[in-house]
Image: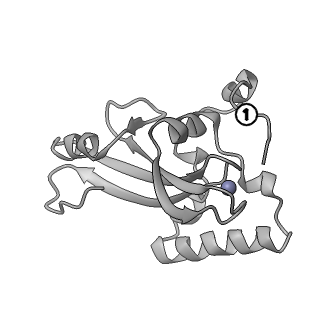
Amino acid sequence: MARRDDSDGAATRRSSFGTASFGGMSAFRGGLVDHRMARRATINEVQRGRLGREEVCDAHPELMRAARSVGKRTEAICPICEEDNLVLVTYVFGPRLPSHGRLAADNDELAAFHRRPEEYTAYVVETCCSCRWHYLVRALPIGGQRGRRRVG
Ligand SMILES: [Zn+2]
C-alpha cells in the first residue's frame, strides 16, 4: 500500500545491502525444496494474520530502486497485496564485485559473467513494487566454466 518509500535517505543507510537483504535468504540455505515450502509458509502466515505485512514487505531501498528500473515484469501477481505484478531482479555476487553485488540488467550481462573463469552466484529476487514484498526465488552458480550452461 502507500507507504513512505524512496525519499527516505535514512532508511537507505540503516542497513547495508547484501545477500542478507533478500527475503527468504536464511531458508534458502536449507535447500531448494524447503525454500519453496518456506516461501509458501511465509505467505500463509501473512494471509492468516500471524505475520505482519511490515515484517515481510520491507525490501531494501536499493532493491526497490532496482525493481523499478530494471526489474523484469512477470505474469505472477504479488501474493501479499495482490495489486501488482511481481518483478524479478537479478544480482551477481562474486570475486572482485562490490560487497553489495552487481545488478544484472539483462541476460546479456549474465552471459558475460558466465563466460568468465571466476565463479559467481546470481541471485534472483521476486519483488513487488507496490507493497515491497521480496523473496529470493533462485540462486544459481555462473561462470567458472563448470560445464553447466544454464543462464537466466
Ligand atoms: Zn505486493
| Whether the residue under disc 1 has CB within 8 Å of ligand 1 | no
Q: Is residue 128 left or right of residue 11?
A: left
Q: Is residue 125 left or right of residue 56?
A: left
Q: x%, y% of residue 142?
A: 26, 52
Number of residues whose C-alpha sits closer than 10 Å to that of mark 1, classed few (under 14), some (14–19) or many (20 or more): few
- Helix, strand or loop status at disc 1: loop
- The total number of labels drawn is 1
In the figure, residue 23 lies in which quadrant? bottom right
Quarter containing the C terminus: bottom left
Q: x%, y% of residue 118?
A: 22, 42
Q: x%, y% of residue 25?
A: 56, 56
Residue at 44% in and 53% down:
124
- The residue labelled by disc 1 is 5
Colour scheme shown: one colour
Q: Is residue 23 left or right of residue 8?
A: left
Q: x%, y% of residue 114?
A: 21, 47
Closer to us: 60 or 78: 78
Residue at 39% in and 41% down:
93
Write down which quadrant ligand 1 falls in. Answer: bottom right
Which residue is outermost to the right? Answer: 49
Q: Amino acid at mark 1?
A: Asp
Closer to us: 79 or 118: 79
Q: Is residue 24 left or right of residue 81?
A: left
Residue at 68% in and 48% down:
130
